[in-house]
Image (cartoon, rainbow, N blue to C red):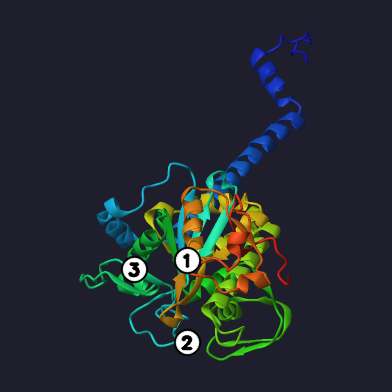
Amino acid sequence: MTDRAGTPAEPDPAAAEEEAVSGAPEEPRRKRHWLRWTALGVSVVVLAAAGVGWWFYRKLDGNITTDTTAADELRRYEKERPPAGTSTARNILLIGSDTRAGEGNRKYGRDKGTQRSDTTILLHLSAGNASATAVSLPRDLMVTIPSCRKPDGTRTREQFAQFNWAFEFGGTACTIRTVEKLTGIRVDHHMVIDFRGFKKMVDAVDGVEICLKEPVNDADAHLKLPAGRQTLHGEQALGFVRARKSIGNGSDTERMDRQQQFLGALVNKVQSDGVLLNPTKLYPVLDAATKAITTDPGLDSLRDLYDLARAMRSVPTEKVQFLTVPRRSYSYDANRDELVQPAASQLFKQLREDRPVVVAPSTEDDDRKPDADGKPDDADTQAPSPTPTFTGRNAAEAVCS
């Protein structure tokens, strides 16, 4: 570049700087531009995901119903309750309510404004999650029910009656106090589930497989099933665990065995299908579970329930055990039950002290009539076992075994 006289012009510093900037390579500038937008996009996605996750958490957390009434009532009787354990073992009382109130429950009978515990299971989760033992308590078991506060504020008298009356008299608190008086075991937490909640739980895991030796047609339980292996969904599953007149000998004991079989199959399916590790499968289960239960303040958050589910997941399926408390027909009424001693006390002692409980399938010898001590006639000739064994099953057993 030259001036009018033809001599070279002096370089202009400002122009040189502008030329240097404008002459910068386009590719690095585009790369920096792309990186800025990528970072912004990632930030938006992360924030959106966090927002959705928080929304799901709040929704599930809000589904849970907290039973503060039972907690308040139990505090009034703290001095008479068994002491809290010193280990990390936990005892959780699971109560299946037969209330007909609420959506979807009226088809099972007229709502009379009362409810009884259709199913009651004491779940003992051992320290270190080495095992989980679920003990069914017969609803017709004759027990001492303490004086309990009724919903209208009045109190019942202490009385000797069938176990499921406790729930009708004074709800969950009365049932817990009755169980603690019977077993000497401190109940740390409780959960109550009704018919509708049970059905939704089964549907959330896409059904549970069972096996029938004979077809079933039970109008009272709304159940009609063919023989053989099959998967039951909500309505059918409820009928299966409630049926009494059309399966087996019609006893409540057989129904409890059937409930234990079903729960074992449910636990096995949840663990084998990886439900707890798959978010797309886990959310429907959590949604159904949190809507289905009423629990104490110590288990009324999603975090608490997840910790419990994680503890259960770590228990090997063969160590998830189901049994019914040793019982026999009540001496004065064949339609009621009484404990078999000393077997029942031995079971309660093992659970109180967080010692192993071993279960094994029933044999022909189990059908022998116990003597006054609750032992078979020839039990005294057998060598004592260091770890007591009770009739029951575990979650690892084949459904059609």
- Measured as percent of width and height from the top left, residue 74 is found at 30, 57
How far apart are the alpha carbons under marks 2 and 3? 33 Å
User: Which amino acid type is shown beneath numbered disc 2?
Assistant: Lys
Closer to the camera: disc 3 or disc 1?
A: 3
The disc, 2 or 3, on the residue closer to the chain's N-terminal end is 2
Checking the image for residue 45, the label placed there is: none
* Number of residues whose C-alpha sits closer than 10 Å to that of mark 3, classed few (under 14), some (14–19) or many (20 or more): some
Q: Is residue 58 visible?
A: no
Can you identify the residue that label 2 sits on? 107
In the displayed structure, 20 sits above or below 257; it is: above
- Measured as percent of width and height from the top left, residue 296 is found at 39, 57
Looking at the picture, tell me which residue is in the foreground, 28 or 209.
209
User: Which amino acid type is shown beneath numbered disc 3?
Assistant: Thr
Q: Residue furthest left?
A: 154
Closer to the camera: disc 2 or disc 3?
A: 3
* Number of residues whose C-alpha sits closer than 10 Å to that of mark 2, classed few (under 14), some (14–19) or many (20 or more): few
How far apart are the alpha carbons under marks 1 and 2? 20 Å
Residue at the image position 33 percent from the left and 66 percent from the top:
174
- Measured as percent of width and height from the top left, residue 65 is found at 40, 63
Residue at the image position 42 percent from the left and 82 percent from the top:
333
In the displayed structure, 134 sits above or below 35; it is: below
Quadrant where the C terminus sits is bottom right
Query: Would you identify the image quadrant in which residue 297 lies?
Result: bottom left
Can you identify the residue that label 1 sits on? 291
How far apart are the alpha carbons under marks 3 and 1? 33 Å
Residue at the image position 44 percent from the left and 87 percent from the top:
109
Closer to the camera: disc 1 or disc 2?
A: 2
Q: Is residue 327 left or right of residue 390?
A: left
Quick check: marks 2 and 3 in contact, CB under 8 Å? no
Can you identify the residue that label 3 sits on? 144
Query: Would you identify the image quadrant in which residue 271 lies?
Result: bottom right
